[in-house]
Image (spheres, helix red, strand yellow):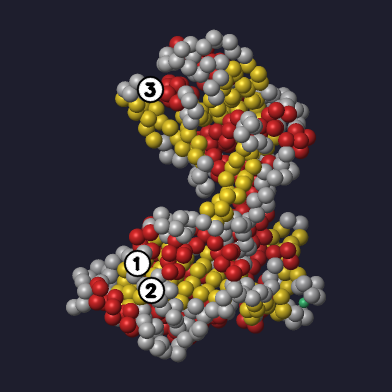
């Protein structure tokens, strides 16, 4: 019995031997079985089903001189199975040490349990080579699979430990745009690729759906390569062309009418021609690679084979996404396989926003809105409160933005805050609405005051929050208990503080500020919102900062500018997501709509207005010297 190190040594030596002259696609067509568990088309793999994958997979063949393959792609193209074929091929045909990197260790576990176990189990020639993970001394664990002449190691890009493993001839990097910029010891891609540097016949493949322009690894890698595009012939005029989104047409907003228009003869190409077009298609380089041993491929979901993702589905997805920047970003990334350009901030100015103000009265909830949330920003000498109403599709209305000057350490200011938050607002359609979720920022100098305020008003929907300027955080996260008060005492019914993904929400808001038509995602402003409000709302810009060569986008404001209106809006939006944790997100607006209706029809107004004032219960901590209690309120 060999120990791990000996197995490794053996496989390292075997990795230097010449390989059989079989290509990856030939191996797959002969041996690869698709599992009924993971594939809609179970049975023997056929490269003919996805002809465009042949050249990509074959570039990974052992006897091909290409060392690095980059594949930037949309969804539903068979990308995952293509990598599985490479894994099966290397185990079966060209064994050697191999490293397979996923964005996280968690994803490695899933890959191991679902994809790899199915791949090995269902493909007879692999089953013989890799012992089941359960059997003792099989050399098989969640993160490593031994086979004659080699070993496959799995590593998460979020952990430097796995990436620092011994030299590997085969390196596969999956979903690289989801890799962290730095895994603790630098760029995880570079770290993993370095593992292969000792092998002259190394084989590296990077695949991903792209994300944001300038921050996308896969796009940078694609551009460094020879940028191959798949050219397919027009069935009418035989002109070879790449499939472009701009040439997919439909009529009357009906996805069923989707057809492709030939860029040369202008004829409509119905989708049933696609199989033949794909079969006759060919990859053509559109650039010169900086390294002749690197090839790069780009493919959008427009090429997805018949029966997978249709042009009709794609048009449908676009129509659902077109008015919502975050959805549109997903569409551009996962369907078109392209990076998303966020020019947000740059194009939205205070002037253009104030021009679209509407004539509805401040402080009244317009028809269409059924939920009111609030966001509260606490400064050293004032509190700002943004009140926003929400309707189906998160259509949004500014109700009021109020600034109350005073001392946050004193009781008077907070009771004035209550006057704004814990009261009913008239609804245009009759009845009243009270803010149901209220997020208060605890990040300033008055943290314990905010905790106390929120704890005592929990039943009014008040919660303490802390903004996080980290990319890709959810609008609101799991709360943590705040057990200690300002005196260091542990409190009985402790307050909770909710992390709020400020950057995520700002991107959403700025995306939506670009909408031109009222409807889902649109933001309405009333005419009383003044220049100062719009100035504050647009006070931040996304700036690009480079960390180790990667662009990081961050929200920044000028030091002199005030941005409370934006913060209040952000917190108010997080408060809507606070409700999503408690109500069915699909029906929440209708649920609250019924509550307003109930008040009007049955006259049981008290049900919604029964929340007793709670000033009496509130004793703010006396920490600081009392400041002169001069306070005044401005409101828009
Ligand atoms: Zn044509």
Question: Sequence-wise, which precedes: disc 2 or disc 3?
Answer: 2
Q: Horizontally, is 306 left or right of 408 in the view?
A: right
Is the residue indicated by label 1 positioned so its CB lies within 8 Å of ligand 1?
no
Residue at numbered disc 2? 168
How far apart, in angstroms, are the residues tagged by discs 2 and 1?
8 Å
Where residue 30 appears, x then y in whole percent?
Answer: 44, 85
Residue at numbered disc 3? 486
What is the secondary structure assignment of the residue under circle 2?
loop
Question: Sequence-wise, which precedes: disc 1 or disc 3?
Answer: 1
Q: Are marks 2 and 1 in contact (CB under 8 Å)?
A: yes
Where residue 102 appears, x then y in whole percent?
Answer: 43, 62
- Asked where in the image residue 318 lies, by quadrant, the reply is bottom right
Q: Horizontally, is 153 left or right of 475 in the view?
A: left
Q: Horizontally, is 562 left or right of 527 in the view?
A: left
In this view, 95 is above or below 635: below
Name the residue rendered at 54%, 79% in the picture: 293
How far apart, in angstroms, are the residues tagged by discs 2 and 3?
54 Å
Q: Which of the four quarters of the rendered structure image does ligand 1 lie in?
A: bottom right
Q: Name the quarter where the N terminus is drawn.
A: bottom left
Q: Which one is in front, 369 or 194?
A: 194
Residue at numbered disc 1? 165
- Asked where in the image residue 54 lies, by quadrant, the reply is bottom right
Name the residue rendered at 38%, 22% in the picture: 486
Q: Name the quarter where the C terminus is drawn.
A: top right
Q: Is residue 559 visible?
A: yes
Q: Callout 1: few (<14), some (14-19), or many (20+) C-alpha neighbours within 10 Å?
A: some
How far apart, in angstroms, are the residues tagged by discs 1 and 3?
48 Å
Q: Callout 3: few (<14), some (14-19), or many (20+) C-alpha neighbours within 10 Å?
A: some
């Amino acid at each position: 019995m060999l120990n791990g190190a000996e197995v490794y040594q053996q496989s390292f030596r075997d990795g230097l031997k010449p390989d059989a002259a079989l290509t990856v696609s030939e191996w797959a067509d002969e041996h690869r079985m698709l599992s009924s568990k993971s594939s809609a088309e179970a049975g023997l793999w056929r490269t003919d089903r996805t002809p465009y994958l042949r050249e990509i997979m074959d570039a990974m063949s052992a006897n091909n001189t290409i060392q690095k393959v980059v594949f930037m792609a949309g969804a539903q193209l068979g990308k995952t199975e293509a990598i599985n074929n490479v894994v099966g091929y290397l185990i079966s045909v060209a064994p050697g040490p191999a490293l397979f990197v996923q964005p996280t260790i968690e994803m490695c576990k899933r890959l191991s349990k679902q994809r790899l176990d199915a791949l090995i189990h269902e493909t007879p020639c692999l089953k013989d080579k890799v012992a089941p993970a359960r059997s003792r001394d099989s050399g098989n664990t969640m993160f490593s699979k031994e086979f004659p002449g080699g070993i496959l190691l799995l590593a998460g890009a979020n952990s430097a430990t796995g990436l620092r493993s011994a030299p590997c001839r085969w390196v596969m990097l999956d979903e690289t745009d989801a890799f962290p910029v730095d895994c603790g010891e630098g760029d995880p891609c570079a770290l993993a690729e370095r593992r292969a540097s000792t092998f002259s016949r190394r084989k590296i493949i990077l695949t991903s759906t792209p994300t944001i322009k300038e921050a996308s690894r896969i796009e940078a890698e694609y551009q460094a390569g020879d940028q191959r595009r798949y050219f397919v012939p027009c069935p009418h005029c035989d002109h070879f062309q790449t499939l472009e989104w701009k040439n997919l047409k439909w009529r009357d907003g009906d996805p069923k009418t989707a057809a492709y228009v030939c860029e040369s003869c202008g004829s409509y190409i119905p989708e049933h021609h696609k199989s033949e077009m794909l079969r006759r298609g060919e990859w053509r380089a559109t650039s010169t690679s900086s390294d002749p041993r690197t090839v790069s491929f780009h493919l959008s979901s427009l090429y997805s084979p018949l029966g997978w993702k249709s042009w009709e589905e794609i048009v449908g997805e676009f129509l659902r996404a077109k008015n919502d920047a975050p959805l549109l970003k997903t569409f551009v990334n996962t369907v078109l396989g392209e990076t998303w350009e966020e020019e947000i901030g740059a194009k939205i100015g205070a002037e253009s926003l104030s021009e679209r103000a509407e004539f509805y009265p401040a402080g009244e909830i317009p028809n269409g809105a059924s939920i009111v949330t609030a966001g509260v920003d606490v400064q050293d000498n004032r509190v700002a409160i943004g009140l926003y109403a929400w309707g189906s599709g998160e259509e949004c209305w500014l109700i009021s933005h109020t600034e109350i000057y005073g001392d946050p350490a004193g009781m008077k200011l907070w009771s004035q805050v209550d006057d704004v938050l814990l009261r009913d607002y008239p609804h245009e359609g009759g009845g009243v609405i009270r803010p149901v979720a209220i997020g208060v920022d605890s990040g300033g100098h008055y943290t314990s005051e905010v905790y106390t305020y929120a704890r005592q008003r929990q039943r009014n929907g008040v919660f303490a929050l802390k903004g996080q300027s980290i990319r890709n955080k959810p609008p609101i996260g799991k709360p943590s208990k705040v057990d200690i008060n300002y005196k260091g005492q542990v409190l009985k019914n402790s307050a909770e503080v909710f992390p709020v993904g400020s950057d995520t929400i700002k991107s959403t808001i700025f995306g939506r500020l670009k909408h031109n038509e009222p409807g889902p995602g649109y933001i309405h402003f009333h005419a009383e919102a003044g220049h100062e409000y719009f100035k504050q709302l647009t006070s931040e810009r996304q700036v690009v900062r480079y960390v180790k060569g990667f662009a990081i986008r961050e929200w920044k404001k000028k030091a002199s500018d005030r941005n409370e209106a934006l913060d209040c809006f952000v917190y108010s939006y997080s408060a809507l997501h606070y409700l999503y944790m408690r109500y069915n997100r699909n029906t929440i607006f209708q649920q609250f709509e019924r509550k307003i209706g109930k008040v009007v029809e049955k006259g049981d107004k008290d049900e919604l207005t029964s929340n007793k004032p709670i000033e009496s219960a509130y004793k703010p901590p006396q920490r600081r010297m009392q400041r002169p209690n001069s306070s005044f309120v401005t409101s828009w």
